[in-house]
């Protein structure tokens, strides 16, 4: 169950492609916590396992850069078709993130590392060049200020 939930958390943005590889957006207030989400590699390389089954290995790093501890309270993955048309969105609150075994607290000037290798079926190779996704991480710093960071994921095929 934990593995299926993990795959659900990361599979939406993994079937994605865009002209904006590695795009990052963060928001914060000066003197408050700030987070930066980085997906490595910025263009996830889909490795064919067999037939139409692919692995999508990547690392996600959430780094606190504002000097205040942050508690992650939501992670949202969104998929868009060409032209920015919304295709799907999935969101996880802090309780769900913890239930998957992931940390939700980041100390000031520290970071959390996650490694994912979701496996999924891709029946149409054209999908690798037609859609892209965003992953958004939101939280609160120790003063109650909202923080967020969004990273765009692209996919290439091995």
Image (spheres, rainbow, N blue to C red):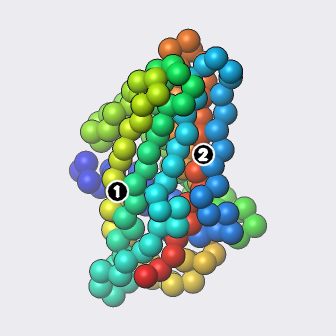
Residue ID for mark 1: 116
Quarter occupied by residue 58: bottom left
Relative to residue 152, is residue 103 depicted above or below? above
Q: Is residue 96 visible?
A: no
Q: Earlier in the sequence, mark 1 or mark 2?
A: 1
Residue 132 in the image, given as x and y percentages of width and height: 61, 65
The CA distance from mark 1 to mark 2 is: 18 Å
Q: Residues within 10 Å of mark 1 (few under 14, many from 20)?
A: some
Crowding at dot 2, Cα within 10 Å, few <14 / some 14-19 / many 20+, comes out as many
For residue 129, the mark is none
Who's the residue at 33% across and 62% down the image? 117
| Residue sitting at x 64%, y 17% | 31
19 displayed left or right of 33: right
**Residue for badge 2:** 150
Q: Position of residue 94 (x, y in %)?
A: 41, 31
Q: In front: 8, or 45?
A: 45
Q: What residue lies at 47% left-to-right and 62% top-to-bottom?
A: 41
Where residue 69 appears, x then y in whole percent?
A: 46, 21
- The answer to whether 46 is drawn above or below residue 84 in the figure is below
């Amino acid at each position: 169950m934990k593995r299926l939930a993990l795959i659900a958390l990361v599979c939406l943005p993994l079937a994605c492609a865009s002209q904006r590889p590695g795009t990052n957006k963060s928001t914060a207030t000066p003197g408050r916590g700030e987070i930066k989400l980085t997906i490595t590699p910025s263009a996830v390389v889909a490795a064919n396992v067999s037939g139409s089954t692919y692995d999508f290995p990547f690392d996600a790093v959430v780094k606190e850069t504002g000097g205040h501890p942050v508690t992650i309270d939501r992670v949202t993955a969104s998929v868009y078709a060409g032209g920015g048309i919304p295709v799907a969105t999935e969101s996880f609150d802090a309780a769900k993130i913890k239930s998957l075994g992931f940390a939700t607290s980041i100390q000031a000037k520290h970071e959390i590392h996650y490694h994912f290798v979701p496996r999924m079926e891709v029946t149409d190779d054209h999908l690798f060049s037609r859609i892209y996704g965003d992953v958004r991480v939101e939280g609160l710093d120790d003063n109650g200020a909202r923080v967020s960071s969004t990273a765009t994921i692209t996919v290439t095929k091995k």
